[in-house]
Amino acid sequence: METQKIAEKFRTLFGTDGILYASAGRINLIGEHTDYNGGYVFPGAIDKVVAAAIKPNGTNKVRAYSFDNQEMAEFGLNEEDKPERHWACYVFGVCREIQKRGGKVEGFDTVFSGDIPIGAGLSSSAALESTFAFALNDLFNDNAIDKFELAKIGQSTEHNYCGVNCGIMDQFASCFGKAGSLIRLNCKTLEYQYFPFDPKGYKLVLLDTCVKHSLASSAYNFRRQSCERAAAAIKKNHPEVDFLSDCKRVWLDEVRSEISEEDFIRSEYVIGEVQRVLDVCDALERSDYETVGELMYQTHFGLSRLYEVSCEELDFLNKLARKHEVTGSRVMGGGFGGCTINLVKEELYDEFVSDAKKQFAAKYGHEPKVYDVVISDGARRL
Ligand code: GLA
């Protein structure tokens, strides 16, 4: 990403130089909607980032300029100072969440910009939160806040200032990302493990439908509630259960008549998906990419038919991938639009991508955007 424009804008606006920080968007190979269910996820940071120039300004006010919106927001650091602009709430939320944890934040000036497509399921908002969490920890707190807490600061920002009851995956990936490695995280215990990921002879490519659903955050929150209701019903029989990820499939069957059919099928998907992450990791250790790919297709089926977070355009691209014998393909991230992630043999790549563009454009009037995935580092000072 071109950081020079940020540095220059900062100088123009504030007459001095800021310090540059960045944090990454993410992909997720498998493990979708499992994080808030205490299950596993398997993300990695990518080479698309949010970058910011920042400098303390000696006041108790923040002056933040969004390069991409060409807008300035000015706000204080108390709870009642919440800004009106949605993008500014991410910056404000991070400041507040640091303060709530006893950390220090004073006034600062900032200019930020990103090259992560918004609404594509690549976690541009987590990257924004992680950039500021990392920077404010460095600038005002001598890096006393550990990386997990930085990820939680981003997550709480979503919960308390942006209206999404998300899990920890995106902020975790953005803070912990490492070039060349995916990270398997147990979202209940927060144990994690890096898996070097370099599938010889294959490529990972994202196809962005460019579909964005405005009701995605409330639909997301509803999915989470379904899972929590089912887990609470199961807990009555099995007190050790805190999350759906703790449940055996038969335990779900036991409560079938007590919960709604919708809650049942949502939970059925989640319990299957938690296991699929482990199966994918096993297959990767054997370099068995065919199995990895098959499991990705299973996830797509589950997300589309059981969890119902896909859409027509995503299903179309998934079907087309099958037709081209793409090894694995599925909707990625929260869903309701955004991208499919595709694991494709190198020799099939060109034909698949060009046909996907052609067929998709013929049906929906525009081509999907194509992003090659490079697994990269997470939050950092540049
Ligand atoms: C969004 C949320 C994550 C996760 C995914 C689905 O990206 O922010 O916490 O729940 O959806 O896997």
Image: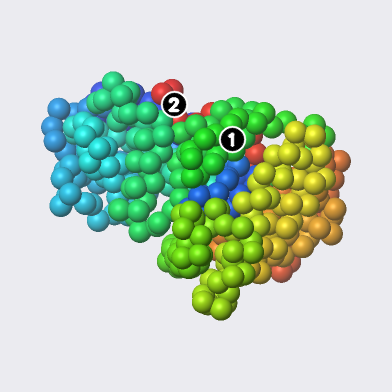
Q: Position of residue 168 (x, y in %)?
A: 46, 45
- The residue that disc 1 covers is 183
Q: Quadrant of residue 78?
A: top left
Residue type at tag 1: Ile
Q: Position of residue 172 (x, y in %)?
A: 47, 39
Mark sitting earlier along the chain (1/2): 1
> Between residues 195 and 349, which one lies in front from this camera angle?
195
Tell me if I can see residue 73 in this picture: yes
Q: CA distance from mark 1 to mark 2?
A: 17 Å
Residue type at tag 2: Arg
The residue positioned 39% from the left and 46% from the top of the image is: 155
Q: Secondary structure at mark 2?
A: strand
Disc sitting over residue 380 in the figure? 2
Q: In the figure, is residue 118 to the left or right of 184? A: left
Q: Position of residue 250 (x, y in %)?
A: 64, 64
Tell me if I can see residue 349 in this picture: no
Q: Secondary structure at mark 1?
A: strand
Crowding around mark 1 (Cα neighbors within 10 Å: few <14, some 14 to 19, many 20+) is many
The residue positioned 41% from the left and 30% from the top of the image is: 147
Total count of labels: 2
Question: Is residue 354 positioned above or below 346 on the image?
Answer: below
> Between residues 100 and 27, which one lies in front from this camera angle?
100
Disc sitting over residue 315 in the figure? none
Question: Is residue 231 positioned above or below 34 on the image?
Answer: below
Q: Quadrant of residue 134?
A: top left
Q: In the figure, is residue 121 to the left or right of 16? A: right
Question: Is residue 382 positioned above or below 368 on the image?
Answer: above
The residue positioned 22% from the left and 41% from the top of the image is: 100
